[in-house]
Amino acid sequence: MIIPQISVFLINKPGRLHALCESLAKANINLLSMTLADSGEFGLIRLIVSKPKEAVQILEDSGLAATITDVVACEVSASKGGLAKLLSTPAGKLQIDYAYAYPTPSKKDVAVMIFRFNDPNVAISKLKASGVKILSAEELLQDDP
Amino acid sequence: MSIIDEVLMKKCFWNDQNGSFFPEMALDFMPTEKLRQVQLQRLQATVTHSYNKVPLFRKRMEDLKLKPTDIQQLSDITLLPFSTKKDLRDTYPYQLFAAEMKKIVRLHASSGTTGKPIVVGYTQEDMEVWAQVVKRGLLAAGFSSEDIVQNFYGYGLFTGGLGVHGGLESLGATVIPVSGGNTERQIMIMKDFEVTAIAGTPSYFIRMIDVAEKMGVDLRKLKIKRGLFGAEPWSDGMREYIEKKANIKAFDIYGLSEIIGPGVGSECECQSGIHVFEDHFYPEIIDPETLKSLPDGEEGELVLSTLSKQAMPILRYRTRDITSIETTPCSCGRTIRRIKRIGRRSDDMFIIRGVNVFPSQIEAALLKAEKSLPHYQIILDRKNRLDTIEVKVEISREMLSDNIGDMEALKKRFSHSIEQILGISIMVSLCEPGSLPRSEGKAKRVLDKRQQGATL
């Protein structure tokens, strides 16, 4: 139920993001989602990719510092108040470090949210108990061409 | 009674113009032959004193099968073993002291690699010598008892503040012991107290010039006529800038805690090199590779021996400062020899805002913060005319966290750890693995941009 997300350290300089994407493209790895957190001087890129283990290896080989972080992906109703409803469950009281939306172009009525919970396993059991649909890595990464 | 004692017994006469003559100044003009005689006699006494009182020195002499009586002429100094900064570390805190603790009236210390500082001690007589050599430096630079002097060297364990303070008091000048920091207040004091002369590190004064400008104070219109600057190497470009911006004459004073502090040598009004007060500190130049002595005029590492220190006599101390002894006499008429102003060092030590720093100290600090040693580079620069130090640290996978807060905390841990050892504020920046330059085997740890390009 845990999704392996890749976190990469990048210095905040022109061209660095391109270099990162280029090395993944060359290895035929699909970028499914990406967010960038920046501190001014450097940034942390968070990626969901089709082949996470391979991707970390490729990024490290190209001289970057990369690591895998456990995140949780869950479905949320794509209507008004959908996310608010999800967070009104006991899981919403847990510490969330960050969250972002995962693109689901084929589905109109559900959206997918990625959460970085302080303790992902506790979060998963609470979400499940509240009847929230949690996506597995296989499900999430399935539309990999 | 020696010629020196005779001079010292005398005082200024009622009709000596202030600043034109002080008995101490006469020592700068001693006939060379007499000076060499005094040096030999004092060297012999210092060697005997050290041999009797300092076990480390005695052991080194015995290893070389030397007795104090083997020093028959001045050139025999080359027979003596060298001493280094490591000796001071290894004997922390008091084992190089050659006087009983009850005779020691002052301790000073400087920062050390492992957090343990280097300790130096002074007897009452050492303190008098110290005040006297600084006074001679002040006189040579044209300071007089009429001056109101703002001393912005740091006061405390650092020898700079109190060392210069002693000389100023001995001269009879009005001392303002303001110490470093609080730049706006410094400018206010300079103006309101009608300061006529200043002393401190050149980089800090350059900062003051900037702040004064921002405050709308024109330093050129104040009463300051001259400044004594030291504790760090400063270029001729910096001198030119200081002299122009503040309309003063800027003089270089040289010294190091291991020998006495400021006052080992100082510039005269000719501003053409540092006169070493060689009746107290004997200078030699050696080749830092072969350790062979070099004749006057040739460039090499400055080696100093104390000739009168009681508490902590140091013989043949390797300063790591690269210079040469001038061969032509100075037009001021002083017979004590001059060394060229210090521009560089033979080891990897650098000086930033008056603080001596070895890259190994920064390495130790990084290691302390993170357990494993990251790849790093130290970048020294001069921004807005103030020396800056930046430490770039490469991120490894082990250090990487997915959390920005954790990464910022890592940065803080590094900078805090370094600041604790050095006592000055630094900037740490994180960078990607492999992004710092590596060269054939030996990493280029220090990038000093201060000497490149601009005159400052």
Image: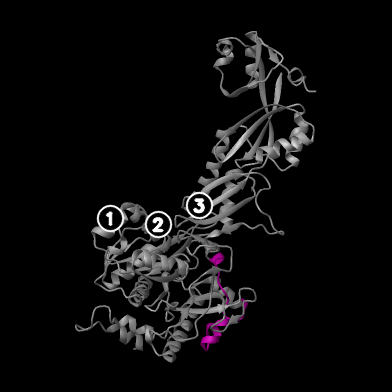
x, y percent for residue B375: 65, 49
Q: Amino acid at mark 2?
A: Arg
x, y percent for residue A24: 75, 34
Q: Which residues are magenta?
A: B63-87
- Pointer 3 or 1: first along the chain: 1
Of residue B345 and residue B117, the one placed in the foreground of this image is B345
Does B66 sit above or below residue B435? below
The answer for which chain carries disc 3 is B
Q: Residues at marks 2 and 1, common chain?
A: yes
Query: Is B239 displayed left or right of A95 in the figure?
Result: left
Residue B421 bears which disc, if any?
3
Q: Is residue B311 magenta?
A: no
> Disc 1 designates what residue?
B188
Q: Secondary structure at mark 1?
A: helix
Q: Secondary structure at mark 3?
A: helix
Residue B442 bears which disc, if any?
none
Q: What residue sits 69% from the left and 36% below the top? A: A66
- Pointer 2 or 3: first along the chain: 2
> Disc 2 designates what residue?
B207
Give me the C-alpha separation between circle 3 and circle 1: 32 Å
Query: Which corner quadrant of the image does residue A88 belong to?
Result: top right
The answer for which chain carries disc 1 is B
Cβ atoms under marks 2 and 1 closer than 8 Å: no
